Amino acid sequence: MDAGGGNSLPSAPDGVKRKVCYFYDPEVGNYYYGQGHPMKPHRIRMTHALLAHYGLLQHMQVLKPFPARDRDLCRFHADDYVAFLRSITPETQQDHLRQLKRFNVGEDCPVFDGLYSFCQTYAGGSVGGAVKLNHDQCDIAVNWAGGLHHAKKCEASGFCYVNDIVLAILELLKQHERVLYVDIDIHHGDGVEEAFYTTDRVMTVSFHKFGDYFPGTGDLRDIGYAKGKYYSLNVPLDDGIDDESYHFLFKPIIGKVMEVFKPGAVVLQCGADSLSGDRLGCFNLSIRGHAECVKYMRSFNVPLLLLGGGGYTIRNVARCWCYETGVALGMEVEDKMPQHEYYEYFGPDYTLHVAPSNMENKNSRHLLEEIRSRLLENLSKLQHAPSVQFQEKPPDFDVGEADEDQDNGDERWDPDSDMDIDDREILPGKVKRETVEPPHNDQAFQEDQRRTAEHLRSSDNAAEEAAACLKPLDISSQPVDEDNVKVEQDHAVNDLVREMTDLKG
């Protein structure tokens, strides 16, 4: 694969089918944030049931993600934070009140049974998808359980504990000079932006509700810092935005980003809380309008990682992500819903699409034109496709897949593979890398970092914690994994359909 090219896949009409890898763990729907909590992992199981009964699974490679290990998570997150997530349980949390406060775990981000395995599962799917893309084993990778964009290096935030997106982007950076992150969740993608705020190797673009709305970040004027200046784009929106207004901004901005930045891979966070009628949202996008963003990103023929995110009217989340899986495959999905175990969730119409509401669109054309003009002006200030120095490529995240034709796992692999298996040495590849070292003594830098530090909770050693958590992410010196490649389960489609038929809601 061309490490730096903007169009790594063969140019093809948008209707041409892509090879899609889909990550799903049957246990993901069992995790439960607690009574009354709006985040419901059960929506992933509902999405999977629709995919099964619409017959879409047979057109994808279906993989069970292998759980991310501690050290995989520590490529971004602080060691003590990961250790806390691993050890805390509902039974022991009252003995760790200070740590709960320090790591922002409690109300929005509760302790629940299986919390750490939940984090390992959704992170494993996103990083596994990145590995598949890096090795040209698919054109599009999908992990609807991922996309938890608020998690920070040292704390949970906004229902998110581990930032699988940052981890996946770090994996993609092993192979690609530049990675583009696009976020269409109604909430600002603050955790991802913050992680890459000072580098020009990752561009973050977030379309979100702004103004007295969680997390409160994502101002139009937040553009990145040091080498990352103009590599963070924020599109602040108001209530009631509809499909036409959304794409009036999305398509020209993203089109210009692709022209100027020329990413080697794209990560698209498809938070479904931007849909009309969401329990926590206030936008008015239709499912087709939301999916048009997926279709547009797909049209550039660049390796694409599709992730989930927010979405709290779960029947509409399942509708949306099912339809967008069809878009990824280049297949139109019938509106009439097939009978399946969650059929009654979708009454009284039992259709895939739902009409948007008649709510007022508070985004005037004048405001939209002003936002678009400002962002396109910022993009015009970028140097085209920044390049970086050559360094040795680090090894992959430990991920593999079961091969039904071989009993001996070691025999599955080509001797020339650069994936780390058994006692074989990793064959060093060459990929351009950079080290980002912003000037810490610069007053403007300190001010930028102070603004992003507002989420840190006070504690006896708050100053030390803040310094550690706000240290810019060094994307040139990530830890090297030396263990054997892990193995995923490659599920037969018939088994998955049968499994979903047996699952209870």
Image (cartoon, rainbow, N blue to C red):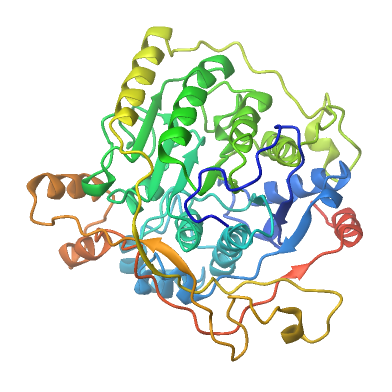
Which residue is at a point 57% across and 55% down the rendered structure image? 33
Position above or below: 11 against 359: below
- Furthest residue in direction bottom, as rendered: 423
Decide: is 54 above or below 117: above
In this view of the protein, which residue sits in the foreground, 9 or 496? 9
Query: Of residues 91 and 33, which is closer to you in this image?
Result: 33
Q: Could you say which is closer to the camera, residue 191 or residue 332? A: 332
Using the rendered image of the protein, determine whether residue 40 is visible from the camera's viewpoint. Answer: yes
Name the residue: 27% across, 50% down.
Answer: 198
Residue 180 position within the rendered picture, expressed as x and y whole percent measured from the top left: 46, 44
Horizontal side, residue 307 vs residue 3: left or right: right
Number of numbered markers = 0
What residue appears at the point 74 percent right and 40 percent down from the top-left corner? 322
Give residue 12's quadrant in the image: top right
Tell whether 222 sits left or right of 264: left
- Looking at the rendering, in which quadrant would you find the N terminus? bottom right
**Residue 87 seen in the figure:** no
**In this view, 303 is above or below 272:** below
Residue 334 at what x, y percent from top left? 85, 29
Residue 330, x across and y down, in percent: 76, 37
- Left or right: 61, with 222 as reference point: right
| Image x and y of residue 185, in percent | 51, 36
Quarter of the image holding residue 173? bottom left
